[in-house]
Amino acid sequence: MTQHDSPFDLLARDDEDHRWAFGTGFTDPLAGVDTAVPEGVDAKALAAYCLMLGDDALIFSHRLQQWITNLPELEEETAVANIALDLLGQARMLLARAAGADPSLAPPVLAYPQEDRLAFFRTESQFKNVRLAEWADGDFAELVARLLIFASWRLALFERLRDTADPVLAAIAAKGVHELTYHRDYAAGWVVRLGEGTELSHERMQRAVVALWPFVDELFIDHQAELVAPSGVRGEVDAVLDTVFELAALDRPQVAALGAVAGRRGRDGAHTEAMGYVLAELQSVARANPEATW
């Protein structure tokens, strides 16, 4: 026997201030970063953009979490769970930055931190995520195709945001680049494997790409609240997708883009029917216990 009488003792063991349980022992990407909004930066514009990026990550993360225990292998459950946690971490930091820059954004539910108020107590029309994030994947092929598109696009944005004037957003982006590179490569590996696999896997992979393609154009429509124009990264993202499609023997879809609703899209708070179901699940516990503390 070691000095630990119980395996649970190991959970509390602190080796050189790095504890592996209880969510501690991780590098804080904001350590040493001045969180005050820099002079010359429009606080409301910064908050609006962080809210958009945070909502993208929060909703996509929740969709990935819904797959846990339903994936074909434990290894894939672990990989998808880690990707979901990465996005959830990005969401938390971005929503916290949004509320810090513009406190009026957070609903007044004082028992919760500001980022939790934004996650759990806004209505559907107040969420600013792109509609690709809320899509309900019908199978694993759709999951990896959607992740490939989303991660390739988000990675291109985050690479540019590392040089943004706000040091907090820049630090979040710098950390996110490493995470998103893995997300993109994980998804690309599966798209290629399924695309060049059996006749059935190829058919399902092609069908998945076709089903998701109407959501792609929205990713590259410039919005007045965005600090990085997404139209400027389209060529880079297209090059990545075209390379993966070629390796996977997939055809680039020729389908119409998902239209706007009265001129509004996800960034404007207009969502698909799926969004209501996402929020009903995501927000149910907090809304049932609005004064609870955890």
Image (spheres, rainbow, N blue to C red):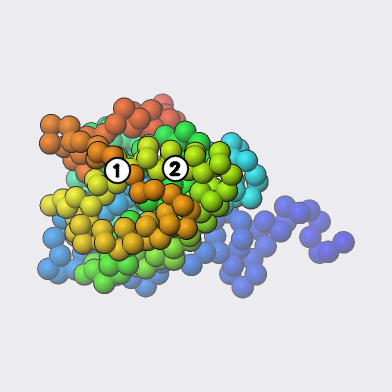
Q: With 189 as the anchor, is 208 left or right in this view?
A: left
Q: Secondary structure at mark 2?
A: helix
Q: Let me know if residue 66 appears in the view.
A: no
Position of 96 relative to 72 (above/below):
below
Task: Point out residue 73 in the picture as x, y percentages from the top left corner.
Answer: 65, 44
Which quadrant holds residue 263?
A: top left
Q: Give me the disc on residue 254.
A: 1
Task: Point out residue 173 in the picture as x, y percentages from the top left corner.
Answer: 34, 64
Q: Name which residue lies at 87% across and 61% down.
A: 1
Task: Point out residue 219 in the picture as x, y percentages from the top left corner.
Answer: 26, 49
Mark positioned earlier in the residue sequence (1 or 2): 2
Q: How many marks?
A: 2
**Mark 2: few, some, or many residues within 10 Å (few <14, many ≥20)?**
many
Front residue (pair 181, 258): 258
Q: Secondary structure at mark 1?
A: loop
Q: Let me know if residue 236 appears in the view.
A: yes
Q: Name which residue lies at 17% across and 52% down.
A: 222
Amino acid type, mark 2 = Gln
Q: With 232 as the anchor, is 13 left or right in this view?
A: right
Q: Give me the disc on residue 16.
A: none
Task: Point out residue 59 in the picture as x, y percentages from the top left corner.
Answer: 37, 42
Front residue (pair 120, 247): 247
Q: With 135 as the anchor, is 43 left or right in this view?
A: left
Front residue (pair 61, 222): 222
Q: With 78 as the anchor, is 281 left or right in this view?
A: left
Residue hosting label 2: 206
Amino acid type, mark 1 = Gln
